[in-house]
Image (tube, rainbow, N blue to C red):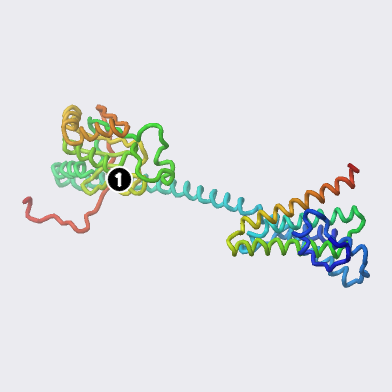
Amino acid sequence: MIAAIGLLVGVVAGLVLQPTVPLWLQPYLPIAVVAALDAVFGGVRAMLDGIFDDRVFIVSFLSNVVVAALIVFLGDHLGVGAQLSTGVVVVLGIRIFSNAAAIRRHIFKA
Amino acid sequence: MSERPRPLDASMTLLREVMERPLDPGYAAAAADPKPRTPLRIALTLVLAIVAGAGFAVSVVSIRVPQRESDAVSRELREEIEHRSEAVAEQKQHNAEIAAANAAAQQTLLGTRGAALSRQVQELGALTGELAVHGKGIQVTLDDAPGRDAVGSDPRAATGYDEGVVLDADLQVVVNGLWAAGAEAISINGERLTAISAIRSAGQAILVDFRPLVPPYVISVVGEPGSLQSEFAEGQAGPYVQSLRDNNGIRVDIAAAPELTLPGAGQFVLREAEPISGGRT
């Protein structure tokens, strides 16, 4: 629960403060957001499964974001940034979809 | 995939277990082997959660920003252009007022020294293109071939030579032909041609005295309409215009005008050329 509350507090703080993101970070933001969404869906599903753990959630959240950004960074430097971004989005998209499906089964029992 | 508890290398699960198990195995591992909840751990979790949330929110917000920024910049530029254009119009108005005042002052100054001098100034002014003139004449209108976008709308859209476009050379030939046909004063789209005027192109735009023109090009000519038209047609420019019309699809229209008013080019200063004293040679 602490993680969820902290996340909410952070979101509100980010929206209120709205600090400017350095330009060199901008290319990685979209992928990072998708990765964060994946972690959030995973967390919700774990909660419904009854095995939610704050620590795991936070670690998976941060590592998802960092790894996704790192992959894009690497791709940019290897000249395949667009392709790697697509790969990451596909992988995360599949995960988000199946997690969302699991959440749906939990809630609607269908 | 083995079900044994594994270290929390969540990063590796990201790609490996996408298809089989979208849920992070870390959750199962943590559930199977719960860690004690120490205050330090809770605090750390909270801080990291806040950081993650803030990062998430900021990312989402800043992804949406650039578009708005570019909008703002383009709006700013547009306002700047409008603002500057207004300033230019004002300056032009101001210029015209000063020129009129100049002419009036000259008139009063010369009036005391003789009407003949004053008339000479007027005539020379009209001749050089400094002063506005009016009289009967003809209007030659050249326009790009139909069915293509106006060049002036976006100079970069059309690149390279296009057959149906009026070129600076075309205008030069036409203007030369008009001078040869006995034109006394010529203006193109309101830009009066003087003894030191140049017609040239910059990119896709045609400049007359460094002012860009937009098609259609209306060449107003003061002179005797009948002889102007016939001599223009008989001279070099006549066949040239005919071939523009026939081969390139450029629209050329020549019409007599009973009364034309040509603006003055304003006072221009000769910096190097000085008249030879002692009269004409």
Q: Residue at 32% across / 49% down in the picture?
A: B210
Quadrant hosting residue A31: bottom right
- On the image, numbered disc 1 is attached to which residue? B208
Quadrant hosting residue B13: bottom right
Q: Residue at 32% across / 31% down in the picture?
A: B251
What amino acid is at disc 1?
Val
- For the residue pair B141 and A39, the one nearer the viewer reads as A39
Picture coordinates of residue A65, whole percent (x, y): 73, 61
Say if residue A20 shows up in the picture: no
- For the residue pair B63 and A53, the one nearer the viewer reads as A53
Question: In the displayed structure, does residue B203 sit left or right of residue A59?
Answer: left
Picture coordinates of residue B178, whole percent (x, y): 20, 36
Callout 1 crowding tier (Cα within 10 Å): few <14, some 14–19, many ≥20 = many
Question: In the displayed structure, does residue B36 sit left or right of residue B15?
Answer: right
Picture coordinates of residue A73, whole percent (x, y): 64, 63
Q: Is residue B30 above or below residue B257?
A: below
Q: Residue at 26% across / 49% down in the picture?
A: B267
Chain letter behind tag 1: B
- For the residue pair A73 and B80, the one nearer the viewer reads as A73
Question: In the displayed structure, does residue B280 sit left or right of residue A90?
Answer: left
Task: Classify mark 1: helix, strand or loop.
Answer: strand
